[in-house]
Every structure is written in C-alpha cells, then in structure tokens.
Amino acid sequence: MKYFIIYCSPAGTTEHVAKLIETTLKEVNSDVFIKDIGKEQNRLVALDQIKAAKEKVCLYIGTPVYGGHTVLPVMAFINELPESKTGFALPFVTWGGVSSGVALWEMGKILIDKGYKIAAASKIGAVHSMLWQSEDPVCKGHPDEDDDKIVKELVIKVHKGLSEGNLPELQLQDLDYQPEIIGAELKKMPIQAYMKMMPPRMVNEEKCTQCGICIEECPSEAIELAPYPVFKDNCFGCFNCVRLCPENAIESDLSMVNMHIRKRKEQINELPLTAAFL
C-alpha cells in the first residue's frame, strides 16, 4: 500500500497535521508521499504519482475550511483524481473554531463518486487564520497535544485495519454531521459567495515594491503583477497577501471580520473541536 498525504495549507496548521500523519505512518514503516498541492505544478506531480501507484493507494487529503468549504486547490485536485476500484481515502479538515462546515462531506462525495472507499475522516481545531492581528484569537493554541493524539490514534487504527483487511467504510451520511439549517445553507452557497462577503483588498502603490512575495505566499496562484498585484478569480480569501506583505502594501479593514467571527462562534458553538470519524 502506498500512502499519499495531499494538502493545502495557507496558515500552516493543515501542514502541521499532514506532517504529523507522515511521521506516524513512517513510524510503522509505511511508504509515504507528501505534497502541498497549492501550486499547479505540485498538483500535477502528485497526480502522476497516484496514477503510477495504480490501485494500491491510501489517500489522506487535507484542507483548511474557508467559508464552510474545501479550498479551491484541493477541490481541483480531487476532481482530477483518477477513478479507483480499490483505493482508500481519508479526508481531513482544519477549522478555526467557528464552523467546520461541509468540507468533509463535499470531499467525501467526489471521492466516493470516483470509487474511493472512505476509510475514516477527521476535523481538527486550529487557531483562526483570519485573527492573526488578535492577541486572543479563536482556537488559540490549537492544534495542541490532545488534538495531535487524536490524529495519531486515527492513523494507527486505519493502518492496522488496512493491514489486516478488516477496516469498515464510512458512508457519505457519516460526514454530513452539521445541523440541517447550517448544512443545507452551505451546500447551496459555494466558496465564491464567501469571497464576495469579505472586505476588499486595496494595493497601496506607493508602498508596493513589486517584490513578488505575495505571489510566492499565495496558496492558489491567484495573484499576478500587472505591474502591481492583481487578484484572480481562483482566490479563496486566505488573506496571506495582506498578512505577509513585508511593506504592508496590501490593505484591508478586517475589524468587522473579527467581530463577525466571534459572533458566529457563539451562535454555532460547534463541539468538539477535534474529532475522528471511524
């Protein structure tokens, strides 16, 4: 069995979980391939590796949750996956404590349609990436040791079940765990609608040095210089460009976003933060 760990990680927490999965699999002597597929070239390399492995595939695929959804690079990757009759998949999400949304469900739906068996899934609480300016962000300190323990135990159980040939499959309804009012709303509202609700970003041309760091740090290749940063339609609103610009040349007023996030957390109160679906 060849294990693949595929993910996109704008703020680093999905990468943390992906590398924890990698370490745990290597501890049990598994053959592991890991790749951040935010860049198109990386997606193509990962797809080629999966095609070469043919049917001996166990795919961990991870996304942060934005607007209740899987981010665009991960959805593009899943849609491009070859069909499989014997492959296994384990979707996982990191989420900022407001709502884990329908990301597991929407990944699982396509994976099942392509013939992959859902061996397990997980949601992992992570510090909210849009609150980097706050001293007390939602989900501060997560993922922590307890979150990591849940992930490690999941990986070990799945590896044991696959090795012994007695791992039960999850059904799509197992990943459809949101209350009806939240789940139904999100299924009708694509991630692009979330982007339209975000505050605009303005480029201060007097500050911008055209250094290209925003392009390097964009997890979906959604920025180009023309001659100053221009944002393309495949942006999913991670705001890495605002957060990581060394000149603070990409400006956005996030004060209302901060208030909205905290209000939504109180309204939804989704618990637990981290959970394994087996």
Image: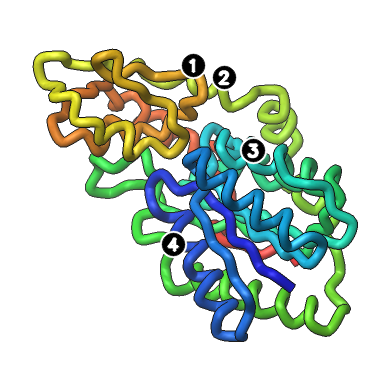
Q: Which mark is residue 75?
A: 3
Say which amino acid is labelled 4. His
Q: Is residue 105 visible?
A: yes
Whole-number angstrom distance, CA of label 3 to CA of label 2: 16 Å
Whole-number angstrom distance, CA of label 2 to CA of label 4: 28 Å
Whole-number angstrom distance, CA of label 1 to CA of label 3: 19 Å
Say which amino acid is labelled 1. Lys
Q: Which residue is drawn at the image coordinates 41% and 34% (left, top)? A: 238
Say which amino acid is labelled 3. Met
Q: Earlier in the sequence, mark 1 or mark 3?
A: 3
Q: Which residue is drawn at the image coordinates 54% and 52% (left, top)? A: 7
- 146 relative position to 258: left or right: right
Q: Earlier in the sequence, mark 3 or mark 2?
A: 3
- 24 relative position to 76: left or right: left
Q: Earlier in the sequence, mark 4 or mark 1?
A: 4
Residue occupied by mark 2: 193
Residue occupied by mark 4: 16
**Tag in front: 2 or 4:** 4
Q: Which mark is residue 196?
A: 1
- 64 relative position to 256: left or right: right
Q: Earlier in the sequence, mark 4 or mark 3?
A: 4
Mark 1, other Cα within 10 Å: few <14 / some 14–19 / many ≥20: few
Q: Where is residue 272 drawn, in percent x and y? A: 58, 58
Q: Where is residue 175 drawn, in percent x and y? A: 75, 50
- Position of 228 relative to 51 (above/below): above
- 270 relative position to 249: left or right: right
Q: Which residue is drawn at the image coordinates 73% and 45% (left, top)? A: 81
Q: Are marks 1 and 2 in contact (CB under 8 Å)?
A: yes
Whole-number angstrom distance, CA of label 4 to CA of label 3: 20 Å
- Position of 214 relative to 270 (above/below): above
Secondary structure at badge 4 equals: helix
